[in-house]
Amino acid sequence: MFRREETRTVHVGAVPVGGGAPVSVQTMCNLPPHDAGAILAQAQGVARLGCDIFRLTVPDIEAAKALGKARSASPIPFVADIHFDYRCALAAIEAGADALRLNPGNIGAAENVRAVARAALARKIPIRIGVNMGSLEKPLAAKARGGEISPAEALAQSALAHLKLLEDEGFRDVVISAKASNVQDTIAAYRLLAERTDCPLHLGVTEAGTLVPGAVRSSVALGILLAEGIGDTIRVSLTDRPEREVLVGMEILRSLGMRPPGPAVTSCPTCGRTKVSLMPVAAAVEEALEALYAERLAAGGAKAVERFPRVAVMGCVVNGPGEAKDADVALCGADGFFMLYVKGEQVCRVSEADAARKVVEYVVSL
Amino acid sequence: MFRREETRTVHVGAVPVGGGAPVSVQTMCNLPPHDAGAILAQAQGVARLGCDIFRLTVPDIEAAKALGKARSASPIPFVADIHFDYRCALAAIEAGADALRLNPGNIGAAENVRAVARAALARKIPIRIGVNMGSLEKPLAAKARGGEISPAEALAQSALAHLKLLEDEGFRDVVISAKASNVQDTIAAYRLLAERTDCPLHLGVTEAGTLVPGAVRSSVALGILLAEGIGDTIRVSLTDRPEREVLVGMEILRSLGMRPPGPAVTSCPTCGRTKVSLMPVAAAVEEALEALYAERLAAGGAKAVERFPRVAVMGCVVNGPGEAKDADVALCGADGFFMLYVKGEQVCRVSEADAARKVVEYVVSL
């Protein structure tokens, strides 16, 4: 459906980013930075949902050590998030970080940038330049607020200025992000970057908010950009658990056919025609499918969920049998019970209480 | 940002649809169709959130009477959803429906279509043709499943065939929808319709699923289409309460600048740098703002929330003070407490426990 913009390829651990590689999904650790055990458990948890890359802040040297410890047992690569102190970057590289997120203009003198670039080059790890409307350099922020340039232009100029600092050191394995909390500014900034650089782009709306508004804002911005072929890796920022960020990110990619379908069901909103309790049944079916998906992914990797069964939970005969034809297993509500379909064929009648369990039985047997 | 496709204008009660009118938000009643009191309460509830148009199913004559009773006290217009029985359409028109959703190919003989078209014309009410992948005519569905034509082409052909039946009766006040549960098919179908007709388009992903996946799928599809200038009215279908459908629909429009900002906050995802409990504070602030928004909307209409205060809830100093500059009121987390900003200026220090209450105090005082 979409022609991808051509970008160079970098590698975050074993995960290729850019150059036409599948768009990867990232999240960020929200735990205290010194608790290696908890960090590892969170990385394992998000990996089970399909997360490809895990980022964590490294505000001090002790955090770099925790990163190293957790990384050694993690199934997915770690990006060290660095602000202000280049020594944390060096310590994170030393400890085994797979990539850095760092804005070279924020770590002081040119020799600091040089030291980081050399260490990253020696370990062959990429650096993401991550500019953000809330932490833009003061002169650019003032120009944008004064209307002299657009917010998107300010973001793009900032990112490209940071990029120049790394390129001046001969460092080219760079990913760029340019995030605003405003969806339109975010879209415009990435369009500018896609024109002006061939660095892979990490997409995200920053501080997108709580679960539902945050999912909407992220889906609109990332959906529009990805449909234009822009974006090589994504992170959905939510004021919620990292697991939810991954679920939203995966669903964005799935909706555009950039990942195979996952455990989320097709289900109807119900209306005055509905004569079953659909909402709890849909929720129970989806919860069971999510567990099954995570189990298969953990056991067999991406290959094991490439053709995950598609399930529909429908309220009535208007669209139910039609949707059942496009699903592996479907429920179609009648008067106080459901008809269960497998591959579009009616199989049996099930009660509301048994519906979710029966669906999962058939899904497992497929 | 977007050039809107040119469409003809119809009116659903006092709400213009098409012809460059603001994109309106719809939802559908999920209550039993004979309980006028409950239907009215739901219509009033969604109107308080910004919903413009309320649809309800009319499966029998008694439901038409309930529609009429609830409509007479409703602040927003009602669309009667009709399947199969043209007498329900006539009864709904008679009872005071502001519009019909009806596929003329599904109500039997040509004289039935003629009777409905005449009655709608006499009352000057529009008809939405709503085709849906799950209830496509069998020959078109078979062609699409067999790969002879694309699903999008099948949806578009079906809609245009229904349209011809109405146009043959001289009826032109038609809105069209063509929904699939698959996001890509939905996008492709509406792109075809935008090329082939100037009827206003009602956008939606059908059976989009439970809250979060459904919000993502709807936001991706509607975001992409609206950004291309396609779409005159929207309905988000969720296996959840109609109120949530409205919140998601409104947020999609807001994210693209098609509605003024609402009560949803800008808030950060937190990370290892965060030293406050941000998630409950963000949730409490947002809940209070939603109540304030609904109150102002109910008291003063859309005008009263045109410049609703923008609030940011941020975890630390990296992006906090920057985001505070673009917010009317902001919290920025420090070590166990927040700094409160008004119009970008530090005002006072607040505890976690007091933070939400203090934000609302300042918001109300603006």
Image (cartoon, coloured by chain):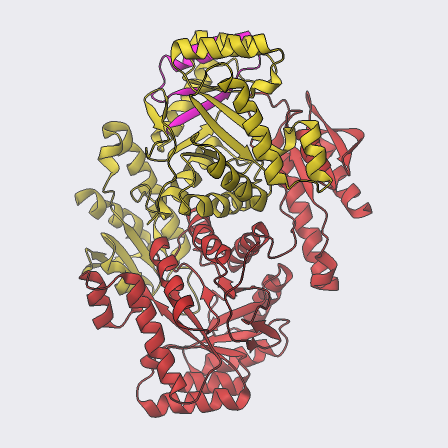
Chain colours: A red, B yellow
Q: Residue B312 in the image: state x and y as whole percent.
A: 30, 54
Magenta-colored stretch includes residue A345: no
Residue A318: image location, x then y, percent:
64, 25
Viewer-proximal residue among B340 and A210: A210
Position of A74 relative to B36 (above/below): below
Is residue A320 rendered to the left or right of residue B320?
A: right
Where residue B38 appears, x then y in whole percent?
A: 46, 18
The residue drawn where x is 68% and y is 47% is A289
Q: Where is residue A63 shown, x and y percent of the image?
A: 47, 78
- Which residue is located at x 40 percent, y 63 percent? A190
Can residue A268 be seen at all in this image of the molecule? no
Q: In what quadrant of the picture does the N terminus of chain A appear?
A: bottom right
Number of numbered tags placed on the structure image:
0
Q: Which residue is pictured at 70% across the width and 36% down the height?
A: B143
Question: Is B241 rendered above or below residue A27?
Answer: above
Quick one: A357 or A254, which is closer to the camera? Answer: A254
Vertical comparison of A200 with B42: above or below: below
Give the side of residue A206 with respect to residue A173, left or right. Answer: left
Residue in view at x 36 percent, y 52 percent: B281
Q: Which residues are magenta?
A: B52-78
Left or right placement of residue B138 versus residue B72 in this view: right
Q: Nearer the viewer, residue B173 or B271?
A: B173
Q: Is residue B55 magenta?
A: yes
Do we see residue A228 in this rendering? yes
